[in-house]
Amino acid sequence: MKAISRKSYLLIPSFTALLSFLIIVLLHLLIYPYPLITRPLMAQERPFRVQTRIPLEQRNASPSPTTELDPAKNPGGTTSKPQARLETVRGGRHEKYCSIVFQFSDEVSFGGPRIRGNEILLKLRDVATELRPFRKYKTFDSWVKLKKAGHNLDVQIGLPRNFAKPHVFLMENPHQLVINLYPKKHGGVPSVFESKILVSPLEISQSLGSLHLPPPSNSVYAIPASQVESPRSPSKATGISKRKEFFGGGNKQQGPVDLNKARQLSWDGDYEAAKAIYKQLLNKNPRDVEAAIGLATVTAWSGDHDKARQLYEEVLKQQPANRDALLGLGRVLSWDGDYEAAKAIYKQLLNKNPRDVEAAIGLATVTAWSGDHDKARQLYEEVLKQQPANRDALLGLGRVLFWQQEYKQSLKIFDQLLVIYPGDQEALEVRNNVLQAKEAKKQFKIRVAYQYQDLSFTSNAYGSNFLISFNEPRKWGVRAGFDYVNKFGDSAPGYRVGGNYWVTENTALSLDVELAPGHVVVPRQAYTLEVSQVIFKTFVPSLSYRFTHYATADAHIVMPGFTWYFYPRFDWMVRYFYSVSQFGGQNHVNHSGMTRLNWNVFDPMTLFLGYARANESFDSGNPADPYGAFSADHVFAGFSWEIYKGVGFDFTFDYEKRNNGFILKTFNTAIIYRW
């Protein structure tokens, strides 16, 4: 009968945990379609005027029989479509990477890229150009060499010093091949997610004879809130890329050679040389509107907003409705903080053409900068109804939601953006700022847990606990609660209080006190002190000391360890336990260790898996053999999942096998609520 009863007790929490997990999955699918299920924009859904990244494996797939693009299979070099034209090559330095952009008149296919020495090699298939064959960039250490090869174009790109890896992708509207170059000092392409730093101690306790694991959600964020961007800082939050401003985003047809050369120089950052060419063109023809707008644009880029404003206004005297001049003037006015004048210009353009997406985004951006976030949000959403994958509208909407402190909605927008534009640096940086701000909020948390333990050698044990905490990240936190344990016929309540304090920006102290005066099996008193140090945001060594007082024994435990955030969304923890148990007038030394791997699958959910080797000594209570000891192997796993609006659930299973043949199976479930 006892065996049947034990199995029955075991099935109840197992079935409950499984049913709860299935319900959580269903709820999450209904509530959070991103990022568990991502839905990139399909080709047939391409909106009115959208710029979309196309996966290289899709774009470089084997051509159809009617369009042979492989020179090896088509020695004559002829194709069933006319050659695309390479219109421009431009390069620029960004904060954390450099980029080179090739723009074409039509869709292209290419071979490569491959690296040879200090060069990147590409073959552009069925592409012709009239651009000069060599260019060297002044703003970063690279160059581009073009060489005709029949109907193809061979491209060589010089690698900058300390080069790590290229990130290559194709874009449409206009057709572009983009190569981003990341230096080694930035570690390659930045990650979407920056891990959290755990400071809660993880200990081997004798309260239930097994590991007691703090849930993965018990953490303190490691990045200072001071790094979060200001909501009204146009220098950090333009929402408009300068490289897309030039003549409506670069969709103009190929112009005169001198005009194209000036544009190329401006894109390369050689503003003075570009200005000189524009001035020469205007000396020849003072009514050359394209040259005048080009001069105004590059003047604005160089920082002389007053002069740029004057140049745009001179163009508008000739052509009051010139769209490019109005857009340029609107941007300069917004950069100078003249928000109402900028709004008036954007509204003028939208009255003429309500589907002018650039004007709509300009109006939304300047509205956000002026502080009317609700109106800006509405304007961005109207743009996204026309163009669901518009990069600037998604970025702007994500920022506005961020400034309104709607962090979850903001993260959802950035996840959607990064599905379409996986390497977008600005989106990655702002998304990390949102994560920092979200974690920096003062936060209350309640955790209610139930633990059930199936023991092969005696009656089963169970327990429950309640914990409430308040945390101000990177400053301080407090917690308090009570628990109840029934094991080996010993049952009584216990109480605990604790807190953590950040001594410096990277150093945290944690103290916990546990009191259970009526207990025999679990400690009547326990004190745990830990110090943690964040190093390079990825490595966190820690040192803990724990003193426990039982009815008939005392124990001192020293616990050095470290946590390593070695890869985006992953961290690995290792801890060693040196314990001295004092009972029967003797000291008993034991050594134990454990390791755990955490995986943040996506922001609301974390999985973990671990192993521990534990050695324990105890007072058996048997006069014939008063000193007991055993060693045990633990394998444990679990998850923590925030289901909806601060409500979460976590589950842990620990399988313990002792050297005396005893087996313990521990199930721990908890409901968490944050606000």
Image (cartoon, rainbow, N blue to C red):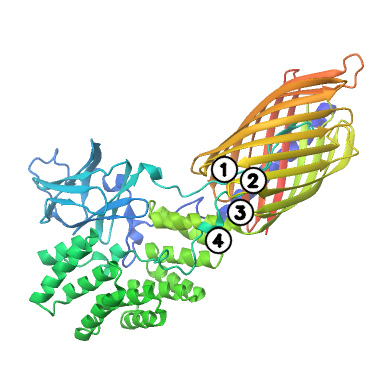
Q: Amino acid at mark 3?
A: Leu
Residue 340, quarter of picture: bottom left
User: In the visual, does 579 lie left or right of 178?
Assistant: right
Separation of marks 1 and 4 at Cα, in angstroms = 25 Å
Marks 1 and 2 close (CB-CB < 8 Å): yes
Q: Name the residue beneath numbered marker 2.
A: 508
Residue 576's x, y, as percent? Answer: 65, 28
Mark-to-mark CA distance, 3 and 2: 36 Å
Q: Amino acid at mark 4?
A: Tyr
Lower position in the chain sequence, tag 4 or tag 2: 4
Towards the viewer: 178 or 275: 275
Question: What x and y, as percent, mark residue 191?
Answer: 45, 47
Label 2: element kind: strand
Disc 1 marks a residue whose amino acid type is: Val
Give the residue pinned by disc 4. Answer: 407
- Of label 3 and label 4, which has the lower sequence position? 3
How far apart are the alpha carbons under marks 3 and 4?
20 Å
Dot 1 falls on a residue whose secondary structure is loop
For disc 2, the neighbor class at 10 Å (few under 14, some 14 to 19, many from 20) is: many
Q: Secondary structure at mark 3?
A: helix
Observer-nearest of 43 and 558: 558
- Within 10 Å of the Cα at label 4, are there few (<14), some (14-19), or many (20+) other Cα atoms? many
Kind of residue at badge 2 = Ala
The numbered disc on residue 27 is: 3
Mark 1 — residue? 534
Would residue 233 appear left or right of 141 to someone viewing this image? right
Distance (Cα) linking label 3 and label 1: 36 Å
Between marks 4 and 2, how big is the CA–CA gap? 26 Å
Between residue 490 and residue 617, name the one nearer to us. 617
Residues packed near mark 3 inside 10 Å, few (<14), some (14 to 19) or many (20 plus) = few
